[in-house]
Amino acid sequence: MAAQLPAYKQSFLKAAIDGGVLKFGSFELKSKRISPYFFNAGEFHSARLAGAISSAFAQTIIDAQRSTGLDFDVVFGPAYKGIPLCSAITIKLGEQAPECLDKISYSFDRKEAKDHGEGGNIVGASLKNQKVLIVDDVITAGTAKREAIEKIRKEGGIVAGIVVALDRMEKLPAADGDDSKPGPSAIGELRKEYGIPIFAILTLDDIIAGMKGFASDDDVQRTEAYRKMYKSTD
Ligand SMILES: O=P(O)(O)OC[C@H]1O[C@H](OP(=O)(O)OP(=O)(O)O)[C@H](O)[C@@H]1O
Ligand SMILES: O=C(O)c1cc(=O)[nH]c(=O)[nH]1
């Protein structure tokens, strides 16, 4: 286990490993890259694991509030994996910081607009004129995060920041499709382009340090080779 990590990150990494959230093999990502590892936040479904992931998010958010002044009204989870996250994290924040019980809410989007009943794309708190914190499982190329930012802005919200469980530390996909060239990070470009802070509970470096005790040498080598190929220059 990565010894330098704060205790709550270590126990989150342990929960991800023990809960089978972190898998090794061959996985096609949203970006079309083929990855030897995959972080499936859908596996955090038991009461124990849902508690573990929401606690780690709440701790990361509270640390960011203290250290950077992060301020928000609504916790927004992009469909689909962001949906249970935003709800569980909001409940956990209310428990850990009771002063925010009546101050913060959650909200999420539908992948397809609903054309009956209340209609629309957003479920939960209105985003209009609200400071919105996006929570999601993973950041790879930043495509899903860009879509979420644009949706929130369209609804009149102000994006306050992003918190993810895992920063895969990857470079942006190359415009010419040649992924072998060095490139800037997806996370750094989002920070610059939108002027927002982005926080992660774990990074790929933490995972590689933590997997050494339990994964096969072959999986460690393939994950290190993937990091070498796709890690950003910043
Ligand atoms: O493009 P990025 O911002 O780097 O993020 C990669 C995202 O892609 C996946 O979501 P997907 O859109 O496949 O939806 P899901 O939540 O339904 O799995 C995954 O869950 C990450 O959230
Ligand atoms: O980039 C993705 O699509 C992705 C990577 C990952 O580790 N986990 C996930 O759910 N999606």
Image: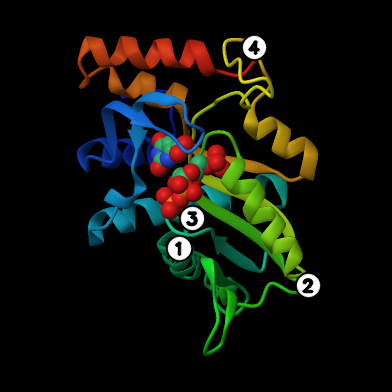
Q: Quadrant of ligand 2?
A: top left
Q: Picture coordinates of residue 115 (x, y %)?
A: 55, 81
Tell me the mark number nearer the camera, choosing from 4 and 1.
4
Q: Mark 3 points at which residue?
A: 58
Give the side of residue 51 with respect to residue 161, left or right.
Answer: left
User: What is the number of the mark on residue 182?
Assistant: 4
Label 1 environment density (alpha carbons within 10 Å; few <14, some 14–19, many ≥20): many
Comparing 97 with 45, the one in front is: 45
Question: How much space separates mark 3 and mark 1, taking CA atoms?
Answer: 15 Å
Q: Does the residue labelled 2 lie within 8 Å of ligand 1?
A: no
Amino acid type, residue under disc 3 in the picture: Ala
Marked residue nearer the N-terminal end (3 or 1): 3
Q: Examine the rendering and report whether any part of residue 71 can be seen.
A: no
Q: Does the residue labelled 3 lie within 8 Å of ligand 1?
A: no
Comparing 89 with 34, the one in front is: 34
The residue shown at (43%, 29%) is 5
The residue shown at (30%, 14%) is 220
User: What is the number of the mark on residue 83?
Assistant: 1
